[in-house]
């Protein structure tokens, strides 16, 4: 009963969103309702602290002057090529890092958006309040180990045994019915982001289709006998619930192995042969299996390391963004191939932003950061949030080096994504504990998903 | 990474010191003549430039052929003929009209000077030695290195610091009165050997501080005294003088004592003090007669009065001292003459005695020869005694001092009031207190099976009477229900389990019944010989897996004795990894799990480490992990309070949850709440109020009740402010020390909030020290009713089963409570409880094995082990249980996690998804086929069954499933293994498939 009620409600919301989108001339509502109910979030975590300052650059003259003054030797454009020109909906010009060439066209197509200056916050804080220490801020800002945990847990302190991706699908777990297939999947080993109170922290490693290593014997009859033996062993009813549950997990693994190796998981879109490309290809395969697994709400966690660019930043950062954009572009094309482009939203997160002022040939740990959001449901071609004033010691600088005070919290960012997944306003506070500090749940809708 | 760049900017200013120009107009061309040097610094763009000395730049310029040597005039040095004070420095500059203009600096013709003369830097900065040289006029010379015959020199006098005298303040007024005086002097640069002079004459001087001296002297006549301060010795210097006027004073004479009673024929000494003149001579008279008379008594020139031999008519006489300098000035005393005192004899009893420190002794005096038998009591000559030597009352009751004085013998004297010449005394020897009587009972804890006996021994110290009486739970000799104990300490357990299985055995001293010692006896089910299954199940719960040898040992010893043996085994020491890497610790740990003899301790450490958590995710080096690991190792069988204290004070937890450098509000980052919150939520009481059986307590509306509020967290955080990292060797302690893991954290009272705190409804008083507040916090948490069921539930889930009955939790919790948090007793209660020892499972029995246990148990079952250099640790990361590196303080999985789509708890299922299950199965398969470097296993026990499938399956059934394999499963295994190519393949097939089965994946 409960399951049906929620499904109906989310279908209604889907129709509402479709109507809005069709007014914008983007989609027709018929296509939306014809697609089976499925939604997925794909987090691409840029470990080390992506330099948002050189991911998107403001090109109005005064803002660019402030950028160039603060950025010094790191200021773009550099040898890696000219900036990729984009315009926000209000006509404000921006430049994307040339490494983002692969997803640059998606901006004009309205599939790619940027959320400006977001980061972990306890509550809104101004420069004056920060400097006078009168408003609580997250613990251990600028520390990798703490901040990457806070970003994933969604708690602005070192606490939290679950991640906000896991909690998002916790809140929606009834939509997945009786399927025990993992609802929160990491493609780079177990991730806190995916751990829920109800759902498991599951991982699916790229290139590892859950092949069982003991089934490669000669002669074939020996292999077959082992496989049959395993399958039969898992069927014994021992009368102990935990043994049955353990056997169920292994049975699911065998079933998933067959699915991943079968044709139903084949994706024809070409992916770059990078780590992130492999991970997103794995995600695409799992999404393709959604009707077989019965999954209707899933979150995925992919990641790429190397963003802690204290030195040699120029080429390194361009190269990392090139990997990100090529993998994301391929993934977007794959979702189009699978007919779920409007039902899958990819987004970036990172430990923190970086200092505007360079330090040697790199930059230091920062706080607020710009993030990329990509998908058919994204109201793209816009910069969301408030683009910061880049003057050193300006109103958005928490010190003197262009370390941004976030103007939008990570929790608002996550809540906008979770709401699109179908988490109700009532349930949002169970996913994001401090959301109330940033206004009502409705006020925490940043609008990039309608 | 950040520091390197700032140095860059400082260099130009530093490198110009050599030619810093005191007079730009006169000297400017000294620098300007250097080609290629920009006036504000170094040439731009020098490759690899970080910090180059000036000399290096010149060398560079020379090799570049940009300079040619030439002399253009005479050298000069500046400033000339100067002085420098100790403790300061003097910068010299040189005019060097020579190209190149490189120079060296010399002190008394020593390049760079030396420690005695002082040193001079390459840039001409002269720094004096700590003490001025004996000959304190030095020659400072600058010499060209290009043309060493060219030089310039000047003299420099090294002096002590100039002692400025600002004011002189005579005691008692603004001027000095003729005669003895005392003055206080204010100024600066005073030294301990400074000498005050008055009109050039040295005074006796006392050093107070660098700005204050006092001196005493004698002013002979009115006029002015000019004071100055002299710093003596090498580099001596005398400072400015300050004059003080001297005025003539009024001469006064005072006689002491002013009155006296003197009996006929005895003497009495008087003293006269003359002020206002330097001539202190007096003449003594009695009743106006200089020197006195036979009738009134005579007085000597030194003031000693001798009474007449006959009592005169008037018994009052006046003794007067008249100033010689001013005959009108005098002082006088009144003497009352009395008849001769009676001859008295005084006795004191006892005459010698010993008194224990803090004890008392009554003395009795007798006085004969006078009707007045009163005496005054003194100790070592002090009436009434003193705290140091003991006090004595007016009735002669002596109370010894609380501690032994340096001289432990004192004299008690009774002096006759009638004639103070009559006295008697006693010698008191003070002795330390005898050692207190103590009673200790061994063993302190013991497990005794129902119906069996166990001997306890009592050790009595502090008395020769070592007899004791024995009781059980307060009942002398015990009782049939609780068990009996003989007069020699042999305890015999009852045959039926009493309501509480934990008993107190007490031995009470016969010499002092207030003194006793206790032991805890834990009653256990009868030590029947456990069967193979029972022993194996016990070892699955108490070790990292049963081995054939351990199963045999448990069966031979029985559970209680085996537990006692495990409790008494020495704890495997934790090595300090040579590379300080966590990876080395992880290798050691995985290996230790499979090999350590103290398996129970390792298993309990492993469980406690998932409750009181740190992680190498943040503690990235081994040294940061070790204090936490060692705390768990030390206290695994100790008291939970001691464990919490050591962990709280450890640098590991200080860093992991930010207790280090947590400060009171207004300092630093303020009071950090991470550790306080987790201390309550995860380490002690949890989020919800619990019933004693571990179930969540519901209020009358059926709602769970939070154990604490945010206010409690904040108050607790205040109580735990004031800790910082220990001061690293060679470092100066700071208010907030840098990270250091060589010792427990230190306290910083100045960072500690001293207000009163209200935590969980209990008050922590104000003004406690940092450790006292920690102790108060531990007291509040250790006595919180949630802690026993909270910890019992977690330990049972980790060791025995995911879904224990409430009764099981309550039984364990009550042992934790009754023992005040004793982990050894708690672990015993967990492992000996009937529910744990029930070998017949129920539908909700068991717990899923997590990767570390699953793999370790498999290796140990096959007589295998991990090598301490194994390279397989990374696989545990993929299986979501990287040793020492849980993803957060919530550890690898939550003890509150439920099996998906089920009401049952199944914590380990949180990290058992299809990928993890497949990876675990693949590792089990790898272990079967790759014994050698990373690990070893032994399959030889199965070799005889290579062609006997039923025999093989039965052997594996016994080894991995302890005989519990269902018949149908046996048939499946026989069918699956039979097509195997060879015996080895068939053996591996049966082991592999059994290891994959839910029957082996779950510990039940």
Image (spheres, rainbow, N blue to C red):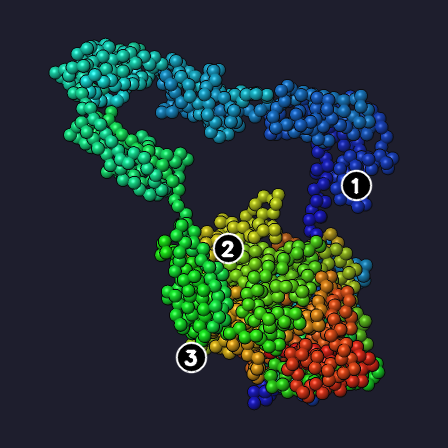
**On the picture, is B27 further left or further right than B391?**
right
Q: Which residue is mark 2?
A: B721
Q: Nearer the viewer, residue A233 or B938?
A: B938
In the rendered structure, are the residues bearing label 1 and label 3 in contact, judged by CB atoms less than 8 Å apart?
no
Q: Is residue B732 shown to the viewer in this render?
A: yes
Q: Which mark is residue B701?
A: 3
Q: Residue at x 76, y 29 (%)?
A: B30
Q: Residue at x 68, y 30 (%)?
A: B125
Q: Residue at x 36, y 42 (%)?
A: B356
**Secondary element type, mark 2:** loop
In the rendering, at what x and y percent does residue A60 appear?
Answer: 70, 62
In the rendering, at what x and y percent does residue B74 appear?
Answer: 78, 21
In the rendering, at what x and y percent does residue B704 appear?
Answer: 46, 75
Quarter of the picture containing the C terminus of chain B is bottom right
Q: Which residue is mark 1?
A: B43
Q: Are marks 2 and 3 on the same chain?
A: yes
For mark 3, name the chain. Answer: B
As displayed, is residue B58 above or below residue B748?
above
Q: Nearer the viewer, residue B639 or A133?
A: B639
Distance, label 1 to label 2, CA atoms, is 52 Å
For mark 2, name the chain. Answer: B
Q: Nearer the viewer, mark 1 or mark 3?
A: 3
- Which image quadrant is residue B49 in? top right
Which is nearer the N-term, disc 2 or disc 3? 3
Which is nearer the N-term, disc 1 or disc 3? 1
Q: Are marks 1 and 2 on the same chain?
A: yes
**Secondary element type, mark 3:** loop
């Amino acid at each position: 009963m409960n399951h049906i009620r929620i499904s109906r409600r989310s279908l209604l919301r889907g129709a509402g969103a479709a109507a809005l989108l069709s007014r914008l001339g983007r989609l027709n509502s018929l296509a939306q309702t014809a697609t089976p109910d499925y939604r997925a979030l794909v987090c691409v975590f840029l470990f080390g602290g992506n330099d948002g300052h050189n991911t998107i650059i403001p090109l109005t003259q005064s803002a660019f002057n402030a950028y160039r003054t603060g950025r010094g030797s790191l200021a773009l454009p550099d040898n890696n090529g000219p900036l990729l020109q984009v315009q926000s909906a209000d006509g404000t010009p921006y430049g994307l890092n040339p490494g983002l060439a692969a997803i640059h066209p998606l901006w004009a197509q309205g599939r790619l958006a940027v959320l400006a200056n977001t980061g972990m916050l306890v509550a809104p804080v101004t420069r004056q309040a920060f400097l006078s220490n009168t408003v609580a801020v997250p613990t251990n800002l600028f520390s990798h180990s703490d901040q990457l945990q806070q970003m994933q847990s969604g708690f602005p302190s070192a606490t939290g045994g679950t991640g906000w991706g896991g909690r998002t699908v916790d809140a929606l777990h009834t939509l997945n019915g009786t399927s025990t297939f993992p609802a929160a999947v990491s493609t780079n080993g177990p991730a806190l982001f995916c751990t829920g109170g109800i759902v498991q922290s599951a991982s699916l490693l790229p290139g590892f289709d859950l092949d069982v290593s003991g089934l490669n014997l000669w002669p074939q009859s020996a292999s077959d006998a082992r496989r049959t033996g395993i399958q039969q062993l898992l069927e014994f009813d021992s009368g102990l619930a935990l043994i049955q549950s353990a056997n169920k997990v292994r049975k699911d693994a065998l079933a998933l192995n067959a699915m991943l190796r079968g044709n139903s998981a084949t994706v024809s879109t070409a992916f770059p042969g990078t780590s992130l490309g492999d991970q997103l290809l794995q995600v695409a395969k799992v999404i393709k299996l959604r009707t077989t697994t019965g999954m209707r709400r899933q979150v995925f966690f992919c990641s790429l390391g190397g963003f802690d660019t204290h030195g040699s930043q120029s080429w390194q950062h361009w190269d990392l963004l090139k990997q990100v954009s090529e993998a994301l572009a391929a993934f977007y094309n794959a979702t189009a191939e699978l007919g779920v482009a409007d039902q899958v939203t990819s987004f970036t997160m990172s430990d923190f932003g970086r200092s505007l002022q360079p330090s040697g040939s790199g930059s230091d740990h920062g706080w607020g950061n710009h993030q990329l959001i990509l998908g058919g449901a994204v109201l793209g071609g816009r910069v969301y949030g408030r683009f910061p004033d880049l003057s050193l010691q300006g109103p958005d600088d928490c010190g003197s080096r262009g370390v941004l005070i976030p103007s939008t919290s990570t929790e608002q960012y996550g809540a906008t994504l979770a709401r699109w997944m179908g988490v109700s306003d009532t349930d949002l506070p169970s996913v994001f504990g401090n959301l109330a500090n940033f206004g009502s749940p409705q006020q925490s809708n940043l609008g990039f998903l309608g | 990474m950040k520091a390197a760049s700032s140095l860059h900017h400082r260099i130009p200013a530093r490198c110009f010191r050599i030619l810093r120009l005191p007079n730009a107009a006169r000297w400017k061309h000294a620098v300007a003549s250097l080609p290629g040097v920009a006036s504000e610094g170094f040439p731009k763009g020098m490759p690899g430039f970080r910090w180059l000395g000036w000399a290096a730049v010149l060398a560079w310029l020379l090799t570049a052929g940009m300079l040619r040597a030439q002399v253009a005039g005479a050298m000069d040095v500046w400033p000339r003929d100067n002085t420098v004070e100790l403790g300061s420095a003097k910068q010299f500059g040189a005019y060097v009209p020579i190209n190149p203009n490189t120079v060296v600096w010399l002190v008394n013709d020593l390049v760079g000077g030396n420690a005695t003369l002082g040193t001079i830097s390459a840039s001409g900065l002269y720094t004096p030695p700590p003490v001025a040289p004996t000959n304190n006029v030095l020659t400072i010379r600058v010499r060209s290195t290009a043309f060493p015959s060219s030089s310039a020199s000047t003299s420099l006098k090294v002096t002590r610091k100039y002692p400025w005298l600002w004011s002189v303040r005579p005691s008692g007024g603004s001027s000095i009165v003729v005669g003895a005086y005392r003055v206080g002097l204010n100024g600066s640069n005073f030294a301990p050997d400074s000498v005050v002079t008055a009109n050039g004459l040295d005074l006796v001087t006392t050093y107070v501080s660098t700005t204050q001296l006092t001196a005493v002297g004698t002013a002979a006549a009115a006029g002015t005294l000019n004071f100055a301060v002299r710093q003596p010795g090498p580099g001596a210097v005398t400072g400015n003088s300050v004059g003080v006027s001297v005025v003539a004073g009024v001469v006064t004479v005072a006689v002491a004592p002013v009155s006296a009673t003197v009996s006929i024929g005895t003497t009495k000494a008087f003293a006269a003090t003359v002020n206002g003149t330097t001539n202190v001579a007096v003449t003594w008279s009695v009743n106006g007669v200089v020197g006195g008379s036979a009738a009134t008594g005579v007085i000597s020139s030194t003031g000693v009065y001798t009474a007449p031999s006959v009592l005169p008519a008037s018994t009052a006489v006046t003794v007067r001292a008249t100033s010689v300098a001013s005959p009108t000035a005098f002082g006088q005393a009144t003497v009352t003459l009395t008849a001769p005192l009676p001859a008295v004899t005084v006795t004191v009893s006892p005459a010698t005695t010993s008194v224990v420190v803090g004890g008392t002794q009554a003395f009795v005096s007798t006085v004969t020869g006078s009707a007045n038998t009163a005496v005054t009591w003194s100790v070592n000559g002090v009436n009434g005694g003193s705290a140091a030597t003991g006090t004595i009352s007016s009735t002669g009751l002596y109370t010894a001092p609380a501690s032994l004085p340096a001289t432990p013998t004192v004299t008690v004297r009774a002096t006759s009031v009638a004639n103070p010449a009559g006295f008697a005394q006693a010698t008191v020897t003070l002795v330390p207190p005898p050692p207190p009587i103590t009673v200790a009972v061994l063993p302190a804890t013991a497990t005794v099976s129902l119906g069996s006996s166990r001997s306890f021994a009592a050790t009595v110290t502090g008395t020769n009477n070592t007899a004791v009486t024995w009781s059980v739970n307060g009942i002398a000799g015990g009782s049939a229900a609780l068990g009996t104990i003989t007069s020699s300490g042999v305890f015999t357990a009852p045959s039926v389990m009493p309501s509480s299985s934990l008993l107190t055995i007490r031995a009470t001293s016969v010499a002092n019944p207030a003194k006793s010692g206790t032991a805890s006896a834990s009653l256990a089910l009868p030590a029947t010989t456990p069967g193979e299954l029972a022993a194996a199940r016990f070892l699955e719960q108490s070790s990292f897996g049963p081995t054939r040898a351990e199963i045999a040992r448990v069966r031979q010893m029985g559970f209680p004795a085996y537990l006692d043996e495990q409790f008494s085994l020495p704890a495997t020491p934790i090595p300090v990894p040579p590379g300080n890497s966590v990876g080395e610790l992880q290798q050691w740990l995985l290996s230790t799990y499979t090999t350590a003899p103290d398996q129970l301790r390792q298993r309990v450490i492993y469980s406690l480490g998932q409750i009181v958590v740190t992680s190498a995710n943040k503690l990235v080096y081994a040294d940061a992990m070790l204090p936490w690991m060692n705390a768990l190792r030390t206290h695994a069988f100790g008291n939970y309070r001691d464990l919490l204290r050591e962990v709280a004070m450890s640098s590991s937890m200080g860093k992991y949850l930010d207790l280090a450098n947590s400060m009171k509000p207004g300092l630093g980052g303020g009071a950090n709440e991470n550790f306080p919150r987790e201390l309550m939520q995860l380490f002690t009481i949890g989020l919800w109020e619990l019933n004693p059986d571990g179930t969540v307590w519901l209020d009358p509306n059926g709602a769970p009740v939070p154990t604490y509020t945010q206010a409690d967290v904040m108050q607790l955080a205040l109580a735990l402010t004031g800790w910082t990292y220990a001061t690293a060797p060679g470092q100066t302690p700071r208010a907030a020390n840098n990270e250091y893991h060589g010792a427990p954290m230190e306290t910083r009272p100045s960072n500690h909030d001293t207000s009163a705190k209200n935590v969980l409804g209990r008050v922590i008083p104000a003004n406690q020290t940092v450790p006292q507040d920690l102790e108060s916090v531990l007291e509040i948490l250790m006595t919180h009713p949630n802690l026993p069921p909270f910890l019992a539930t977690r330990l049972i889930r980790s060791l025995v089963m995911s879904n224990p009955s409430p009764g099981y939790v309550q039984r364990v919790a009550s042992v934790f409570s009754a023992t005040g948090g004793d982990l050894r007793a708690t672990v015993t209660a967990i492992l000996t409880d009937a529910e744990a020892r029930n070998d017949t499972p129920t539908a909700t029995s068991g717990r899923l094995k997590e990767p570390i246990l699953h793999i370790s148990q498999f290796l140990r079952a096959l007589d295998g082990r991990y090598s301490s250099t194994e390279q397989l640790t990374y696989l545990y990361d993929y299986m979501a249980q990287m040793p020492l590196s849980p993803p957060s303080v919530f550890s690898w999985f939550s003890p509150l996690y439920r099996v998906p789509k089920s009401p049952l708890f199944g914590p380990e299922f949180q990290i058992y998804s299809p990928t993890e299950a497949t990876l675990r199965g693949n590792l089990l398969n790898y272990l079967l086929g790759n014994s050698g470097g990373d690990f070893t296993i032994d399959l030889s026990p199965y070799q005889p069954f290579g062609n006997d499938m039923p025999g093989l399956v039965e052997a594996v059934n016994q080894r991995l499933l302890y005989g519990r394999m269902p018949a149908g499963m046996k048939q499946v295994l026989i069918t699956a293994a039979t097509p195997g190519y060879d015996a080895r393949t068939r053996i591996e097939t049966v082991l592999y498939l059994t290891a994959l089965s839910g029957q082996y994946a779950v510990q039940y």
